[in-house]
């Protein structure tokens, strides 16, 4: 059966004398085949579109470097493979991380940084180096957090602040989820 399909496709697809590919005499633009979706990252898949109407939550990330809030990139998770990760940002991002999936997911901050393509270690956070004499402070909903930054689980309205300093912002800001209708 496969041989027959290949034979029929070969007969239907031919080049005319000008070198332009045709199918049944109609010019066509050849394609490279189907787009390969981006690989899942720690259980977070990349689908053709948003998973609206299913699981849809929001978390927030605020990076502060030496007392100044740093922007979180727009469209993190929008893959060049024509797919959208279940965890992504929009434009403008305002640091809002969208969690949109066919079922409940609670990924970690480490997974978000992996999808973003940025480091999250004790020596580098995004594009900031932690230099001698500087410290990292982390907060979840303004409460101090002392564990692994990569292990922070992102849940509904989780507000994560990571600071490299001094100086440090006190108290760390909270994102107005209700005012933003999120």
Image: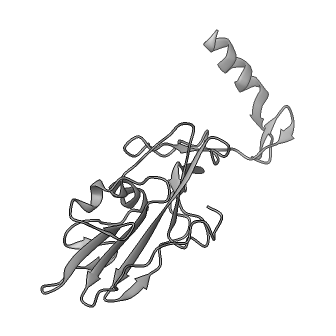
- Expressed as whole percent of the image width and height from the top left, the position of residue 15 reads 76, 39
The quarter holding residue 5 reads top right
8 and 141: which is toward the camera: 141
Residue at left 73%, top 19%? 8
Q: Is residue 68 left or right of residue 163?
A: right
The residue located at (37%, 44%) in the rendering is: 42
Residue at point 49% right, 59% down?
Answer: 157
Image quadrant where one finds the C terminus:
bottom right
In the picture, residue 135 is in which quadrant? bottom left
Q: Position of residue 173 (x, y in %)?
A: 43, 78
In the rendered image, the vertical position of residue 163 relative to residue 5, given as above or below:
below
Task: Determine if residue 145 is in view.
Answer: yes
Closer to the camera in the image, 28 or 90: 90
Query: Is residue 152 toward the left or the right of residue 60 in the image?
Result: left
In terms of depth relative to the viewer, which is nearer, 35 or 4?
A: 35
Q: Position of residue 37 (x, y in %)?
A: 53, 43
Q: With respect to residue 144, does 82 lie above or below?
A: above
Spot the residue most to the top.
1
Res. 81 visible in picture: no
Quadrant for the N terminus in the image = top right
Q: Tag count in the figure?
A: 0
Give the vertical position of 20 relative to 130 (above or below): above
Q: Position of residue 74 (x, y in %)?
A: 55, 70
Front-most of 84 and 31? Answer: 84
């Amino acid at each position: 059966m496969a041989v027959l399909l290949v034979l029929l496709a070969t007969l239907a697809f031919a080049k005319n004398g000008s070198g332009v590919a045709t199918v049944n005499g109609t010019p066509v633009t050849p394609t490279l085949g189907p787009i390969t979706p981006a690989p899942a990252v720690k259980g977070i898949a990349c689908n053709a579109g948003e998973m609206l109407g299913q699981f849809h939550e929001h978390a927030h990330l605020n990076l502060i470097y030496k007392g100044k809030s740093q922007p979180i990139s727009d469209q993190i998770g929008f893959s060049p493979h024509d797919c959208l990760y279940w965890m992504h940002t929009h434009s403008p991002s305002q640091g809002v991380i969208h969690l949109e999936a066919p079922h409940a997911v609670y990924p970690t901050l480490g997974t978000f940084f992996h999808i973003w393509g940025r480091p999250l270690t004790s020596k580098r956070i995004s594009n900031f180096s932690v230099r001698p004499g500087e410290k990292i402070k982390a907060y979840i909903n303004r409460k101090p957090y002392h564990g692994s930054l990569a292990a922070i689980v992102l849940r509904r309205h989780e507000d994560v602040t990571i600071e490299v300093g001094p100086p440090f912002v006190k108290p760390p800001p909270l994102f107005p989820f209700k005012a933003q209708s999120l």
